[in-house]
Amino acid sequence: MWRRWRNRILLFAAILGPGFITANVDNDSGGILTYSQAGAQYGYTLLWTMLPITVALIVVQEMCARMGVVTGKGLSDLIREEFGLRLTFVLMILLVVVNYTNVVTEFIGITGSLHLFHVTKFISVPLCAALVWFLVVKGNYKSTEKIFLIASVVYISYIFAGVLSQPSWHDALLATVQLPPQSVWSNSDYIYTAIAIVGTTIAPWMQFYLQSSVVEKGIRVKDYPASRLDVIVGSFFTDIVAWFIVVACAATLFVHGMGAITVASDAAEAMRPLAGDYAFLLFAFGLFNASVFAASILPLSTAYTVCEGLGFESGVDKSFKEAPFFYWLYTGLIVGGAITVLLLPDSKLIKFAIYSQVLNGVLLPVVIILMLLLINRKDLMGEYRNSTLWNVVAWGTSIIVIGMTAAMLLMPHS
C-alpha cells in the first residue's frame, strides 16, 4: 500500500509544473488589481464567483493538457494543421498584440510594487526586464521550471495577508456559497466587476502556454492522470489565492470605507495602518513576485505559440542560434513592454492595464471554440475526445465567456 502511494506521489512530483505554473501566473498584476478592487468596493459579495470560475478554469485547462499529451503538439500547431495557415497567421497577430499589452501590465505591477519602497520605475523596470530575460535565455527548461514553481509557492503570501487582515470568516465563507442579495444586480458597476473577475482568471495565452509546456516536458498518455492532477491542483491553488486577495481587501479597505483603488499597490499601502506591517509587506511582496513571474511567462508563452503556429524552432533548451526567431520575439516583447511603461505617464498606467484585460476577453471565446472543435475530432483525439457530459460543461463555459465578453464590452459603467 505504502509503495503504491509513494510511486503515485513521485510520479505527480515528476509531472508537476505546466498546469500549476500556468494557472498561478494568471494571478498577475491585472488579476491582483481586479481581485483587490472587488474586495475594496464590494466587500465579500463577489466571493460567490470563485466556485464556478474554478470549475471553468479546470475544464478549459484540462482540455489543453489532454490535447498536448495525446497529440504531442501545441495548440497553435494543431490550429495551423486543422484550420490552415491563413487563420493561424491572423490569430497569431492578434495574440501578439494582446500579449504585448499584458506584458506592459506586468511591468506596471513591478512599478507599483517597488514604488511602495520609493524605487522609481526608471530603475525598477530596466532591472527587472533584464532579470526575466536572463532567467529564460540563459537557463534551461528544468532550471527555469524550478524557479517558476518556487515563484508559484510565493503566492502563499496572499493567504497570510488575508489571515492577518482579520476578516469575518463566517461572512466570507457564507458569501462564497450563496448568491448575493438581489439588489446588487441592478448595480452596473457590480456586474462589470463580476465580469472582470471571470475575464482575468481565464486568458487566451494560458491555453497555448499550457499545451506547449506539456509537449515540451514530454508527458506521455500513460502519465496523463498525473498531468490532469497537476492542472486541477494548480487551478484550485490559484483561485484560493484569489479568494484571499478579495478577503484581505474586504476586511480592511471595504470595512473602513476606503472604497475603490486606482492601482494594486494602493491596496498594500492602505492595508498598512489597518492590518499591520506584516500584511503590507506580504501583499507588496506578492505583487512584485506576481508581476515578475508573469513578465517571464507571458512573452515566453507568446514566443512558443507563434513559433509553433508558423513553423519556427522554439524552446528554452535550444540555443539562440538554433531558435533565433523564438528568442528575438521573446526579447522584443520584454523590451517593448518595459519601454512602454517608461514612456507612459503614471496617470495612464491603470487605464492601459484595464485595456489589456478587455482585449483578453475579446480574444478568449475564439480560442475556446477552436479548442472545442479540435478536441472533438475522432481522427485527432480517438478515445480521448470529450465525453457528452464534458462537452456540455465545456460548451457551456465557452458560451458563458462569450456572454461575459459581450457584456464587458457593451454594458455601460461609471
Image: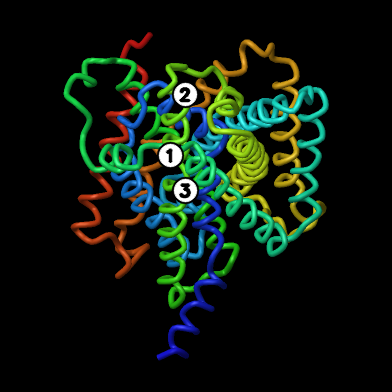
- The residues bearing labels 2 and 1 have C-alpha atoms spaced at a distance of 22 Å
The residue positioned 22% from the left and 30% from the top of the image is 180
Q: Mark 2 packing: few (<14 Cα in 10 Å), some, or many (20+)?
A: many
Amino acid type at image mark 3: Thr
Q: Mark 2, mark 3: which one is toward the viewer?
A: 2
Amino acid type at image mark 1: Thr
Front residue of 245 and 148: 245
Front residue of 4 and 14: 4
State the count of labels: 3
Residue 150, given in percent of the width and then of the height, sits at 64, 56
Residue 297, given in percent of the width and then of the height, sits at 62, 45
Q: Earlier in the sequence, mark 2 or mark 1?
A: 1
- The residues bearing labels 3 and 1 have C-alpha atoms spaced at a distance of 9 Å
Q: Residue 201 carries which label?
A: 1
Q: Which of marks 2 and 3 is nearer the N terminus?
A: 3
Q: Residue 55 carries which label?
A: none
- The residues bearing labels 2 and 3 have C-alpha atoms spaced at a distance of 22 Å
The residue positioned 58% from the left and 52% from the top of the image is 152
Q: Can residue 131 be seen in this view?
A: yes
Q: Mark 1 packing: few (<14 Cα in 10 Å), some, or many (20+)?
A: many
Residue 396, given in percent of the width and then of the height, sits at 23, 43
Outermost residue on the left side: it is: 182
Amino acid type at image mark 2: Leu
The residue positioned 31% from the left and 32% from the top of the image is 402
- Name the quarter where the C terminus is drawn: top left
**Height in image: 353 above or below 243?**
above
Front residue of 389 and 294: 294
Q: Which mark is residue 238?
A: 3
Q: Are marks 3 and 1 in contact (CB under 8 Å)?
A: yes
Residue under numbered circle 2: 253
Q: Which of marks 3 and 1 is nearer the N terminus?
A: 1
Answer left or right for 8 relative to 47: right
